[in-house]
Structures are given as C-alpha cells and as structure tokens.
Image (cartoon, rainbow, N blue to C red):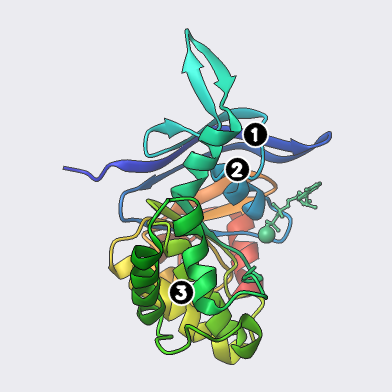
Amino acid sequence: MSAATVVRISDLHKSYGTTPVLRGVDLEVRQGEVTCVIGPSGSGKSTLLRCVNHLEKINAGEVEVDGELIGYRRHKGRLHELKDRLITKQRASIGMVFQNFNLFPHLTVLENVVEAPIGVRGLSRAAAVALGKELIARVGLAGREESYPRQLSGGQQQRIAIARALAMEPKLMLFDEPTSALDPELVGEVLAVIADLAEAGMTMVVVTHEMAFARQVADTVVFLDEGRVVESGPPAELLSAPRHARTREFLARVL
Ligand code: ADP
Ligand code: MG
C-alpha cells in the first residue's frame, strides 16, 4: 500500500501585482516523505512554501494538505474563501521554519516553545511545559529553557525555532532555507536535527542550497526555475544525472 498524499499542489499560479512568480506548479508529497526544493534565487521557492500554509493567497490552482483545500472550501462546485478562524486552524497544523529563526526576543526559550500550544491549541500550561521540555531536549538543548534567544548561537536559535514549530504537533513541516543565515560551522547541527525528524517519519518540504543534505535525506528533489518545476526525481537521479540543461547549469554553479 502506498502512503497517503499529505501535500497535493496542482497548477498553482501566484503573481505579485502583474508579475507572475509561480506559473503552474504541480507537486505531491506523501506521508513521511522529504521533498527538497532547489533553484536559483527568485525562482519562487519561498512563495511556494508561503502558498502551502496560506501566508500568500493563490491566484489559481489548488493546494491541498491532508485532503483539505487550503484557504477555500468547495460548495456546489464553486470555491469559497474560508473565514479567518478556519484559515488559522489549517495553518496551525503546518509548521514553518524560516531563515531568520523569528523567535520572540523578549521570551525565554521555554516561553517561545509553549506560547502557541497554550494560545492556539489550548493545552494546559502544565501539558505545554512538559511537551516543550521534551522538544527542547529533542533538539539537543535541554537545560537552556530559561535562556533568552540572544544568549544562544544562531544554530541553537534555529533548533529552538524547530522545537517551537513541533510543539504544534504539525502534520507537515516546511523549512525555508533553514541554514542560510548561519555561520558555516553551525549548519551541521541544524541539518542533523532536520535529518532526525525525517528519520522519525515527519513529512517535510525543505527549501535548501545544501546539496549534500538533499542527497542524503530527500526522497524527492524538485528543481524550480522561473516559477515552474523543471524536473523532479530521487536525489541520485536529479543531482547526478539531471535531464534538463537548466538543472545542469544550476547544479554546476552550486555543487
Ligand atoms: P526564492 O525564494 O526562490 O528566492 P521568492 O519566492 O522569494 O523566490 O520570490 C520570487 C519572486 O517574487 C522574486 O522576483 C521576488 O522579488 C518576488 N517577490 C517575492 N515576494 C514578493 C512580494 N511580497 N511582493 C512582490 N514581489 C515579491
Ligand atoms: Mg526564498
């Protein structure tokens, strides 16, 4: 039996003003799979992730997560925009980790992690703290619960950002260049946490320039260029024997 589809994107179009950024993207991610998205700067990678968790409104096409249309509901053959409350609920089941950590600077590590489970999921403080401590340990930072973000290295902050996203017990995790803002010596510890999550069966879409990571961890690599999927496939194929000239040119620049 093949695993269920968690993400299904079909013919997704997104423009900013009159500038098309995504020009008909199709993508499927099955339960427990890791998809790495690679591509040049400006190709639409961040926009693609932002459409999946409805940080951007799409212009055409469909995004489904776990069988639910994101941002819309179908009624009598027509699409109707969801109310904000329902969009918030959909978004709560999708974890996102950004390039720049985005921790709350005035909150401790533990408070950063428990804020959403208490405020959005409605967990009791005791339950959220227990979960938070477990997740902080899982990203290798047990003992740092009372530290403030500024007291942590970039790599540690990003690991806390991952713990914070996991505290919502998401069915899908999105990573947007999670190591691009880090000093080179801190990249490995963050990628190791993401690889552990993959090992544990989390479904993920990871935008990254770390080709060695993509090769090791991805089930599928997608090459995006000018708002279209040029090609996709297992890393051993796409990274070693790309079929398209544009993929070859891109890889020649980054490998
Ligand atoms: P990538 O993540 O692959 O570098 P992005 O998705 O960030 O690409 O951006 C794709 C294109 O859309 C770029 O040309 C960028 O300048 C443009 N863009 C991104 N966000 C906005 C926005 N909020 N308003 C207008 N243009 C945007
Ligand atoms: Mg980007």
The answer to whether residue 36 is visible is no
* Image depth: mark 1 or mark 3 in front: 1
- How far across and down, in percent of the image, does residue 246 sit? 64, 56
Q: Are marks 2 and 1 in contact (CB under 8 Å)?
A: yes
- Determine whether, in the image, residue 21 is placed left or right of residue 75: right
What crowding class fits label 3: few (fewer than 14 Cα within 10 Å), some (14-19), or many (20 or more)? some
- Determine whether, in the image, residue 110 is placed left or right of residue 25: left
The tag earlier along the polypeptide, 1 or 3, is 1
Q: CA distance from mark 1 to mark 3?
A: 30 Å
Q: Are marks 2 and 3 in contact (CB under 8 Å)?
A: no
Q: Which residue is mark 1?
A: 58
* Residue 29 vertical position relative to residue 213 in the rendered view, above or below: above
Q: Residue furthest top?
A: 76
Residue at image point 48% right, 48% down: 92
Q: Nearer the viewer, residue 244 or 168?
A: 168
Amino acid, disc 2: Cys
Q: Nearer the viewer, residue 203 or 167?
A: 167
Residue at image point 61% right, 56% down: 245
- How far across and down, in percent of the image, does residue 108 sit? 56, 78
Q: Which residue is mark 3?
A: 213
Residue at image point 56% right, 83% down: 155
Give the secondary structure at mark 3.
helix
Q: Nearer the viewer, residue 143 or 93?
A: 143
Amino acid, disc 3: Phe
Give the secondary structure at mark 1.
loop
Q: CA distance from mark 2 to mark 3?
A: 24 Å
| Residue at disc 1, CB closer than 8 Å to ligand 1 | no
Task: Give the numbered dot on residue 51.
Answer: 2
Q: Nearer the viewer, residue 30 or 54?
A: 54
The answer to whether residue 226 is visible is yes
Residue at image point 54% right, 44% down: 52
Task: Give the numbered dot on residue 141.
Answer: none
